[in-house]
Image: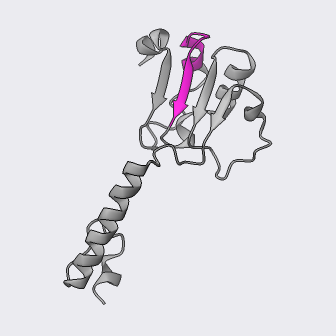
Amino acid sequence: MHAALREADFVVLAPPLNDATRGLLGVAEFALLKSTAYVVNIARGGVIDYDALLAALRDKRIAGAGLDVFWQEPMDPADPIFGYNVIGTPHIGGATDLSFRGIARKVAENVERLRRGEMPVNCANPEAARR
């Protein structure tokens, strides 16, 4: 990863947040990036060390960031990070007409499954569906 960071113009983060990925981009990683690089986080806020990102922006070690996720949500619009070249979206970067149609189609399929007495796909609480 460190070799790739040295060459990257854009770093797009999309891993799950777990012990191995928490703080994946920290002080050492930001030091490797080109000053013209952009960081885009579409994963979870915790994969980037907040203080390291803020310092990288403040010290112009990177050109900017696109954040679809934050360390706390909703993010305070007065947070100092927004004083730099940062574009933030409220965890809706993947919300498109196509994704909404797909979601609607899956919800309708699950309603039909329930109507037939079947278990919904990806049911988070199967005990409730059996009642």
Residue 101 image offset from top left, x and y in percent: 36, 57
Left or right: residue 109 compared with residue 14: left
Q: How many tags in the picture?
A: 0
Quadrant where the N terminus sits is: top left
Q: Where does the C terminus fall, quadrant-wise?
A: bottom left
The extreme bottom residue here reads: 131
Of 60 and 109, nearer the camera is 109
49 in magenta: no
Q: Is residue 108 left or right of residue 62?
A: left
Vertical relation: 102 (above or below) 83: below
User: Which segment did they paint magenta?
Assistant: 28-41
Query: Which residue is at 48% across, 10% downward?
Result: 6
Query: 42 or 115: nearer the eye?
Result: 115
Is residue 40 inside the magenta stretch? yes
**Residue positioned 78% across, 30% down in the render:** 83
Residue 38 is situated, as x and y percent measured from the top left of the image, at 56, 21
Residue that appears at 49% across and 39% down: 42
Colour mode? one colour
Residue shown at the point (22%, 77%) measured from the top left: 113
Establish if 54 lies above or below 95: above
Image location of residue 48, percent across then percent down:
57, 33
Give the quarter of the image for residue 62.
top right
Outermost residue to the front: 97
Query: Above or below — where is 80 with respect to 1?
Result: below
